[in-house]
Image: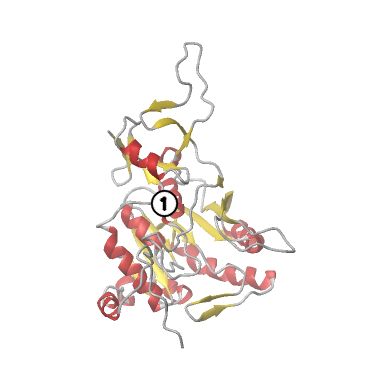
Amino acid sequence: MDAPKPRSALNQTIALSAADRDRLRSRLLPLSSISALPVPSGTLQGDCLTISAALPQAWADLLILDPPYNLSKVFNGKRFGRRSVQDYTDWLDAVICRLKPLLKETATVYICGDWFSSASIFTVAAAHFMVRNRITWERDKGRSAQANWKNASEDIWFCTVSESYTFNAQAVRQRRRVLAPYRDRDQQPKDWQSTQAGKFRDTGSSNLWTDITLPFWSMAENTPHPTQKSEKLIAKLLLASSQPQDFVLDPFVGSGTTSVVAKKLGRHYLGIEQDEEYCLLTEYRLEHADQDPRIQGWVDGVFWERNTFALQQHAATSEMPPRLDPKAGKSIQ
């Protein structure tokens, strides 16, 4: 058998050592620690449908629900199989019935899915919550199809428990390059700003996201998880729909993106995951979040377009608008 190829020096995908695993196991929360308020921040290994029964009620401010989609996928040797639309709908309904009692009356819920899962998501979400919008985001990689359109998008359904909920529109502004700048009658910039880094306009975030980069091997946040979400994508949800010190719940936390972003943004968090390796990857990333609190594509309190890294660095030393401090909840100079 040929020896495995040496790993490229540019490959930053997290690979746990035996020593890492031994150290990180002690960081996982014991089930006994979550039966009463306040719920501690951390990672629980187990089935969320079972663990939810042990959790206190009405404590989570934000639920990020990223369950297995209705397709066949292997997660570290464990297979989730595609099923009929009705069977998947029934399964998802059972999940939400278990999780809904954990939510505050003012809580927000985001449910992730692909085009095939979304029919089930809307059916179940509409039965339990107020469905407010559907975000569609462009995946920047995927296999071509010969007899169908290439699948290059996913959905996130925006729901709330009640009419009272958090939405911070200013916290999720997008900074775009101005290619055709308009000026007013006095020839002053209209809705844009000229800086040493270039001409930019900060705009409100829509429900169509084309600025998301999926984690890949040269990114420090990348893990072996097959359906890992990017920190930038989750940061948009957390900044829009939670406040500093709010509690974020992710019952299918995978390799930990939601928990890591919550920690970086000054939120409390609980991640639940069945697979031990993914739990340990989560704890590894949480360990390193204090040393590197950056979120790719989120600079100076705004979300930048893709492929603008050089401009982001230039803008960091240029005169730009005030930025948002996510932990203090206010603008800083």
Q: Which one is nearer the viewer's eye here, 294 or 199?
A: 199
Q: Which residue is mark 1?
A: 235
Asked if 163 appears above or below 157 in the picture, the reply is: above
Which picture quadrant has residue 310? top left
- Where is 98 relative to 297, above or below? below
**Horizontal relation, residue 309 to residue 70: left or right:** left
Residue found at the far bottom of this picture: 1
Q: Position of residue 63 (x, y in %)?
A: 46, 59
Q: Residue furthest front?
A: 2
Residue extending furthest right? 147
Residue 305 in percent (x, y) is at 47, 43
Can you say whether 323 is above or below 227 in the image?
Answer: above
Q: In the drawing, does residue 310 fall left or right of residue 99?
A: left
The residue positioned 37% from the left and 56% from the top of the image is 261
Please identify the residue farthest to the top as the structure is shown: 186
Image quadrant where one finds the C terminus:
top left
- Where does residue 291 sit, x and y in percent of width and height? 24, 57
Residue 248 or residue 323, whichever sits in front: 323
Q: Position of residue 286 (x, y in %)?
A: 31, 63
Its colouring scheme is secondary structure
Give the number of callouts. 1
In the image: residue 18, left or right of residue 89: left
Q: Would you call the spot at circle 1 few (<14 residues within 10 Å), some (14-19), or many (20 or more)?
A: many
Residue located at (59% from left, 61% from top): 142
Q: Is residue 282 above or below residue 193?
A: below
Instruction: Using the rendered image of the protein, determine whether residue 278 is visible from the camera's viewpoint.
Output: yes
Going by the numbered disc 1, the residue's amino acid type is Ala
Taking the image as drawn, is residue 39 in sight?
A: no
Dot 1: element: helix
Q: Quadrant of residue 121?
A: bottom right
